[in-house]
Amino acid sequence: MYYLFLVLAFLTGTAISVQAAVNSNLRLALNNPVLASLISFGTGFLTLLIVHLSSGGGIPSLSLTRSLPWWKYTGGLIGAVYVTTVILSVPRIGTANLVSLSVAGQLIAAVVLDHYGLLGFAHHPANAWRLLGIGLILAGVWLVVRN
């Protein structure tokens, strides 16, 4: 089962590159980056709503939604900023540059979150292997971006 999740993570990375190209083309067709982001999130919302409801999911209680800390609702905001940034950036810097820089940012943030156990993550120290991995990723980004 562990290896299945490794494959899914790899395929998700592949999908992110395809998504960047699709959303960028949508922006070009609409000539509006915010509308393109809205359509992207709207289709995603409808897909998730259908999957949730068809799998027997219900609507959470008002008391549950009120009891959650405000920052737990920022995922959608962060996603909207990410998708809009992708839509604006891909035509200017290319998909490879965008994805390599995004992956580097994700890895650095993930190591910091793990190292300090932030946002409820389990504590995983930033050891020499992880720091070497960051260094190698940054070297790879430099090679991709200097093109």
Image: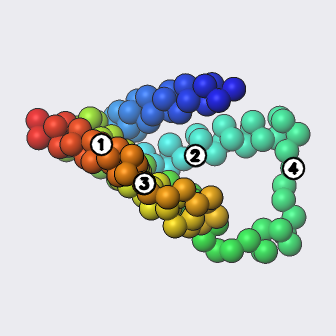
User: Which disc, if any, is residue 5?
Assistant: none
Q: Residues within 10 Å of mark 4 (few under 14, many from 20)?
A: few
Nearer-N-terminus badge (2/1): 2
Determine the CA span between mark 2 and mark 1: 33 Å
* Residue 25, position as x, y percentages in the image: 34, 34
For the point 87% across and 64% down, the residue is 61
Q: Are circles 4 and 1 on residues that touch, CB within 8 Å? A: no
Element under disc 1: helix
Element under disc 4: loop
Residue labelled with disc 3: 127
Q: Nearer the viewer, mark 4 or mark 2?
A: 4
Determine the CA span between mark 4 and mark 2: 20 Å
Q: Residues within 10 Å of mark 2 (few under 14, many from 20)?
A: few
Q: Residues within 10 Å of mark 1 (few under 14, many from 20)?
A: some
Q: Nearer the viewer, mark 3 or mark 2?
A: 3
Residue labelled with disc 4: 58
Instruction: Quadrant for residue 22, please give it.
Output: top left
Q: Are circles 4 and 3 on residues that touch, CB within 8 Å? A: no
Determine the CA span between mark 3 and mark 1: 16 Å
